Structure formats: C-alpha cells, structure tokens
Image: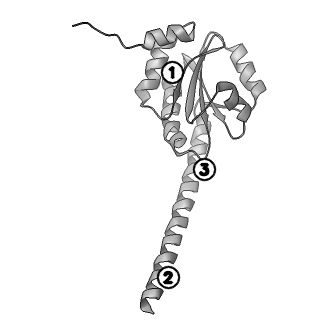
Amino acid sequence: MSKKYSNKNMTIAGIITFLLFLATSCSKNESSNSQNNTSSVKTISSMEELNQLINDNESKMLVFDLYANWCIPCKILSPIFNSLSEDYNDQAIFLKVDIDKNPDIAAAFGVRGIPYVVFIRNKKAIYALSGVNPKESYENVLNSCGMAESADACAQLLKPSHSDG
C-alpha cells in the first residue's frame, strides 16, 4: 500500500514540477516579447505590408525571420536576430513574420522548416538560412551579400575559396 501511495506522490510531484516549468516559461516569453518591442526588429502582419516594404526598400537589404511562437529553435534565434538588427541597423532592415498568423507569407517564401531567415535585395530573395545558425553565419551573408544584385552573385560571394596546394 505504501508503494502505491509513493508512486501516486511521485506522479503528483512530477505534474506540479511540469506545471511550474510551464508557468516559468510563459512568464519568460512575456518578458522577452516586451524586450523584442524595444529592438529595431519590426513584425510584419500581412502580405500587403510585406509587399509594401519590399517595394519601398530596394536600396537596403531586408532580412526576414520567419518563426512561430511555439518553436524552440526560433526562441533560440531571437536574441541573435535582435543583436544583428542592432549591429547592422545601417545596412539592413530586420523583420519578423509569425508563420502561424501569416501562412501565405510562409508559402510565398517556400518555408519548409523554421526558423527560416531570408535575405532580400532589389525585390528578390538572394539567400536564406534554415534552422538556428551561429551569429557569424548571418553576419557572413550580411557582409558578403550586402551589395549583391542577385542570388547567384550572393552565392558566388559566399562560396568558400579553394586553394590548390
């Protein structure tokens, strides 16, 4: 009888621990969302807004983070993306798109997995990175492809140089 009672207590303790974990996670999300509002990253809420931004900003690179609130890797990428927006504020415009609220935008970009970061220049997607990558990967694209006119030019600039030797 005491073994049954002990298992029941363990189950209840496990459930309570899990609920406390969820409550803590939710409060962290709320505080991180309020931090996102102070960064220079703008959230896109419609296809019309996306098209307007692309049409109005030919001279600057646009960097889109396509994410979902439930996506753990997206939450890992968020502070990296915010840091990039501060570091490259003069070279690019950083934007976020919640794919659950904007599935049409996700479809337009051909998103198959998130997070998905798309770099646009001259109204064309010139590069994209899927998943969470080191900050240096995003910086490499921004530095190498900032003035690239096409996806081919960007890919050429990012191609590792091979030395014969």
Label placed on residue 139: none
Local crowd size for mark 1, using a 10 Å CA cut-off: few (<14), some (14–19), many (≥20)? some
Which residue position is annotated with label 3? 30
Which residue position is annotated with label 1? 88
Which residue position is annotated with label 2? 8
Q: Residue at x 72, y 39 (%)?
A: 101
Q: Amino acid at mark 3?
A: Glu
The picture places residue 60, in percent across and down from the top left corner, at 60, 13
The picture places residue 83, in percent across and down from the top left corner, at 49, 31
- Seen as rendered, the residue at the extreme bottom is 1
21 to the left or right of 62:
left
- Residue 50 figure quarter: top right
The mark closer to the camera, 3 or 2, is 2
The residue nearer to you, when weighing 148 against 162, is 162
Q: CA distance from mark 1 to mark 2?
A: 55 Å
Q: Residue at x 52, y 65 (%)?
A: 18
Residue 1 higher or lower than 25, as above or below: below
